[in-house]
Image (cartoon, rainbow, N blue to C red):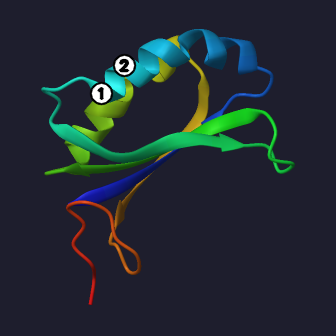
């Protein structure tokens, strides 16, 4: 099952994001999680400038696995996020390796 994760940063914490980002990126690439990251990247301010959040598309068996994965993310541990929204997701258009499209 696929899930999309939207993490929104607390205001004025870009320096913290930049400091923790290398360990966050390493965490996403580590094997052995119960979650597989399919797509990942930062979101940006409306003008396309500063990073202000995170978007992840992941594959996991359960919502609990995804919640545990997010809780252990270095960004979460550092207290970067103001909010995290996790939603089940179905691919309706487009493709990526391993994607199963909703018909």
> Which class describes the residues within 10 Å of circle 1: few (<14), some (14-19), or many (20+)?
few
Q: Mark 1 points at which residue?
A: 29
Q: In terms of depth relative to the viewer, which is nearer, 26 or 11?
A: 26
Q: In this view, does 50 lie above or below 43?
A: above
Q: Is residue 74 left or right of residue 88?
A: right
Residue 80: where, in percent of width, then height?
Answer: 60, 22
Q: In this view, does 62 lie to the left or right of 20?
A: left
**Picture quadrant of residue 20:** top right
The disc placed on residue 41 is none
Instruction: Count every numbered label the image shows and give the total.
Output: 2
Cα separation between marks 1 and 2? 5 Å
Q: In this view, does 78 lie above or below 101?
A: above
Q: Do the residues labelled 1 and 2 touch (CB within 8 Å)?
A: yes
Residue 45: where, in percent of width, then height?
Answer: 79, 43
Which quadrant is the C terminus positioned in? bottom left
Q: In terms of depth relative to the viewer, which is nearer, 5 or 96?
A: 96
Residue at x-position 54% and y-position 18%: 21
Which quadrant is the N terminus positioned in? bottom left
Residue 90: where, in percent of width, then height?
Answer: 32, 72
Residue 26: where, in percent of width, then height?
Answer: 36, 19
**Picture quadrant of residue 10:** top right
Q: In this view, does 26 lie to the left or right of 20?
A: left
Dot 2: element: helix
């Amino acid at each position: 099952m696929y899930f999309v994760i939207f993490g929104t940063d607390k205001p004025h914490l870009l320096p913290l994001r930049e400091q923790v980002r290398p360990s966050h990126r390493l965490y996403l690439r580590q094997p052995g999680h119960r979650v597989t990251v399919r797509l990942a990247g930062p979101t940006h301010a409306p003008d396309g400038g500063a990073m202000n959040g995170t978007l992840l598309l992941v594959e996991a068996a359960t919502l609990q696995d995804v919640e545990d994965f997010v809780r252990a993310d270095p960004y979460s541990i550092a207290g970067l996020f103001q909010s995290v929204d996790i939603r089940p997701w179905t691919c309706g258009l487009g493709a990526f390796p391993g994607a199963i499209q909703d018909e």
